[in-house]
Amino acid sequence: MTLKKVLSISRPRFWLYEGATFALIGVLASATGTAFIQNPLFWIWSFYFLIPANILIYGVNDMCDYETDKLNPKKQSYETLVTPVMHPALWRWIAFTTIPFLFFLPYEKPALISFGVFIFCAVFYSLPPIRAKARPFLDALFSAGHYVATGVFGYYIGGGDGVPYVGILAGMLWATAMHAYSAVPDINADTKAGIPTIATFLGKKMTLLLCALLYTGSALTLASQMPIVAVTGGIVFLTLMYLSYRTTTDDELFTLYTYFPLINTVIGALVSITLIYGIIMK
């Protein structure tokens, strides 16, 4: 299996989800903030969460989802279909791109726990015996869990102290909505493959309504600390949910979905700018 193929499996359009969550949200929210950028560990772990972490997440996901993916049209063009013959090589790539980073783990308990939660949620979201992906609502929690754990790991490795309750709650609500929305375009393929998800269980419209509630909850949680982010994000995501709710065909819905990574990146950048501004004004 070539490096180019592995990188395509890792979903480059989603790289910033993990990478920016660690580097531009978790670390910036910590005690040392921008000062930690001078530490080699910042660059080591930023690289890990930018690319190798996504090879782990989506590599395991694609190997476990073959029966669904072969029925999903977007796997024929928008994403890469991972066939069973590719599995042994992909497992080797996952080991090769993750195990070396374990030597750079800090010995502090909070950081070790948060990284362990990331690995657990990332792997067992797809892998049996848990396979949270096929358990409605648990699928969304596991998906949200590995994103939030990445941010918490960045917070602690950057010198953060205590438990960032507001960030964890807002992040869980936002990431749960992100997962649920991402599952909506896959409703038909997952239904045909007999895989229950939060979206197949609730249906398109109820899932989108749930996403709207979750995004609203996330915005309200952040309102006192990041009012601009809360208002902007709330308006943008609620508008996206409304437009998606009004779609009448799968093609219309999928077209809107293709803008989703860009929207998440822009809102994530706004969070980062807000954190940097807060550090500068201290």
Image: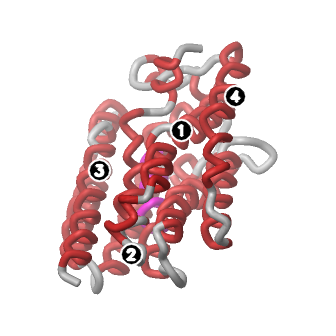
Q: CA distance from mark 1 to mark 2?
A: 31 Å
Q: CA distance from mark 1 to mark 3?
A: 19 Å
Q: CA distance from mark 3 to mark 4?
A: 29 Å
Point out which mark residue 217 bears. 2
Left or right: 14, with 119 as reference point: left
Which contiguous range is marked in magenta?
172-182
Which residue sits at x=69%, y=22%? Answer: 87
Q: Amino acid type of disc 1?
A: Pro
The residue beneath circle 3 is 265
Instruction: Name the foreground residue: 158 vs 138.
Output: 158
Q: Quadrant of residue 42?
A: bottom left
Where is residue 57 shown, x and y percent of the image? 58, 41
Q: Earlier in the sequence, mark 3 or mark 4?
A: 4
Q: CA distance from mark 3 to mark 2?
A: 20 Å
Q: Amino acid type of disc 2?
A: Gly
Name above or below for residue 84 compared with residue 171.
Answer: above
Residues at badges 3 and 4 in contact (C-beta under 8 Å)?
A: no
Q: Residues within 10 Å of mark 4 (few under 14, many from 20)?
A: some
The residue beneath circle 4 is 91
For the N terminus, the quadrant is top right
